[in-house]
Image (cartoon, grey):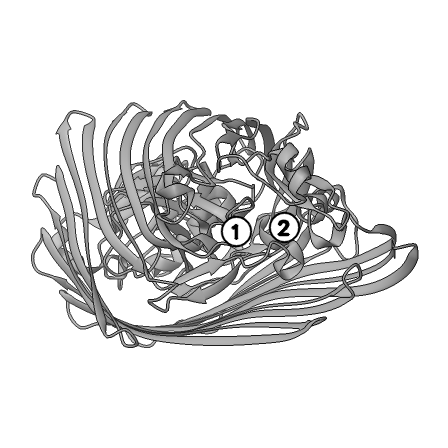
Amino acid sequence: MTGILFAQKTPDSKDSLETILSTIEEQYNITFSYADATIQNKEILAPAKTLSRANLIIYLESETQLIFEAIDSTSYAIRPVNFTDITKTQYLDEVLISNYLTEGISLQADGTSLIRLKSFGILPGLIEADVLQTVQALPGITSSDERVSNLNIRGGTNDQNLILWDGVKMYQSGHFFGLISAFNPLLIDYVEVSKNGSSAEFNEGVSGIINMKSSNKVSKKFKAGVGANMLAIDAFLQIPISKKLSVQLAGRRSITDAFNTPTYQQYFKRIFKASDLNNPEETVITNNENFYFYDISAKANYDISENDKLEVSFLLIDNALDYQETASFNNKNESSNSQLTQGSLAINGIYTRNWNSKLKTIFQAYYSKYDLYANHLDISNDQNLIQENQVTDGSFKAHALYNINDYLNYFGGYNYSEIGISNLEDVSNPAYRRYIKEVLRSHGLFSELTYKSRTGNTRARLGLRANYIEKFADFYFEPRVSFNQIIADDFRIEVLGELNSQTTSQIIDLQNDFLGIEKKRWILANNKDIPIIKSQQVSTGIHYNNKQLLISLVGYIKQVEDITSRSQGFQNQFQLTNTIGEYTVKGLDFLINKQFNRFGTWFSYSYSKNDYTFPELNEGNTFPNNVDIKHLLNVSGTYTLDQLKFALGMNWHSGKPTTLLNSEQSEAQSSLVFEAPNASNLSDYWRTDFSATYNFKFSEQTKAEAGVSVWNIFDTKNVINSYYIMNAENEIIQVENMALGITPNVSFRVFF
């Protein structure tokens, strides 16, 4: 039977299995996961291009004597018949639930969610795999103001998320001041998302971890692509230099400074409407904004030998806004020019060595820099304000993986980190200048064991991390645990827990920081008025998975201590306070997901109660967190018809807490007098999104994809924030931030 599956090639025209797998991934739009040693030195004849996918897998298993195990409809894990044939130090985390929500999203045995961008399906409102938009489809993750730079993982703030790009900590996550991800998905292979029970390898991120990884495989074939949507154009190249060396390049630049598209108009309105660029005390006569963003990423993979690999990567991100305005103030026309720039740079190197079938070491060194700069001429106050926030982060890591036996693995290592953060404020009227720079050096040691029973019914990971901060001469010990047990046919339970800490956070001194657009700035702990943030959390869940039906229920409790009030974005009576407190979140995440042949649908619901405790605020009584969204619901569906994909989804959540104003007392005292903090709520949020993509071929070598999406198709008016200000005439002004209205987008992309 095997003979009919052979390609029309001569008997000696074999290619390496890695090259053939790469070709198959393109032709069939599927992905393969494997340890390098599994396919090492294997060569086979290329399969016929006319094979069905089922016959293709039969052929590959027959010719390679390997097992091709389906993870989901578009992903396969390759393993040997006998696992002892390869290093265990490279085994992949097992996928317990595939097609989690949509193609390319799966749930791992250690409790993390895995998003494979190459096999990603479609989600409502998205026509491209925007990393930080995609993670919001996972239960328990949302953005209280629609910005990816303000992700809330189980009630935490965005600065409490550890965002990694190839192991480099990133301090900037968004373009367009947070509305789209700053990370080009074209060079990202997969994303791991951890909400609890993270590996002891990771430091910081008391709320969650978003770990983006690019491919470390040497490309065997040239690839290229160009694309555009109503916000930006992009391109990528994958260039094999030799059998051992390849280079990947990707770039993206906005078209917003050249084309005033409907998408740009909605984004601009969303970000700038309530900023200092729309001062209610001024009557704007003319204005002109020039805004653009770009990002450039590159990576070189070099197989030094069969056992040695070197990876070098580079990332550059930039946002820039120039705003010119002529306004009438006190019956006089004045002109002003304001500037805001935001950028990041990352340089990274990773060296991997396989010493033998049991031992593997990884060494990594990186440098990361973030800079935010604003120059604002305030006509109403005859004041020029310069602000700057700069972060430099250098790190070295040395890790080792050791296969003790077929069921037990050890992972441990050391890392050194030096972080410097500076803040500058320079005011012309009255003359004032403040410059503060802090530096922290830390050492981290970690060890963890991963266990898998002979039957595979029990999986566990137990780790311990110890951090030593030189400046404070103090240790911080952080245990981590992940446990997964099959208790009956199609049922399993999981228990996750961790202690974590972090030395960096973001604060807001004034609501008009950085033109009122990018209000938050990074600071370092000083163990005085800015302590090290510490968290403890535990969760337990039960999952049923059978015949493409998934039912999941997870309960959790999380406590985050030693947060500062300046980091929470208060816009009420606590706006100018500086005190230390904590918050506690208790919640449930519920999901039902059913996959049919062409149709997939899911219903998710999250409930949480999130309360602050600040001993010096509200007489020490608890009160609702600023991002206490008690009820969060999503109903979505996807449909695939050959190369055409559709997605439709509805998002609803209860309104954020807000603090009402006592108008009578405010007018009598000529100052803002508030009611009880966060005792009321904004109106419920409701949004429906649609998206569609179509894949087709121009030729055997040239493919294309067209897409269309509409965010908020019913143009629902959603208030996502409300606060009060008082002008020079003691008039009370209520400011309401509106969510995005109906926002269309169209994309077209060609692959060579």
Q: Is the residue 381 above or below the residue 719 in the image?
A: below
**Which amino acid does the dot numbered 2 rest on?**
Val
Report the residue at 73% width, 48% height from top. Answer: 727
**Is 461 placed left or right of 73 in the picture?**
left
**Is 681 placed left or right of 446 in the picture?**
right
Q: Is the residue 223 above or below the residue 559 in the image?
A: below
**Which amino acid does the dot numbered 1 rest on?**
Ser
Total count of labels? 2
Quick one: quadrant of the C terminus?
bottom right
Report the residue at 9% width, 43% height from top. Answer: 453
Find disc 1 in the rendering and name its residue: 149
Q: Position of residue 502 (x, y in %)?
A: 33, 60
Quick one: quadrant of the N terminus?
top left
**Is 512 placed left or right of 62 in the picture?**
right
Q: How crowded is mark 1: few (under 14 residues within 10 Å), some or many (20 or more)?
A: many
Q: Earlier in the sequence, mark 1 or mark 2?
A: 1
Q: Residue 750 carries which label?
A: 2
Q: Is the residue 215 above or below the residue 737 in the image?
A: below
Give the structural element (helix, strand or loop) at label 2: strand
Report the residue at 51% width, 44% height from top. Answer: 133
| Along the line of sight, the residue nearer the viewer: 359 or 155 | 155
Could you give the CA–CA distance between mark 1 and mark 2, rounded to whole angstroms? 29 Å
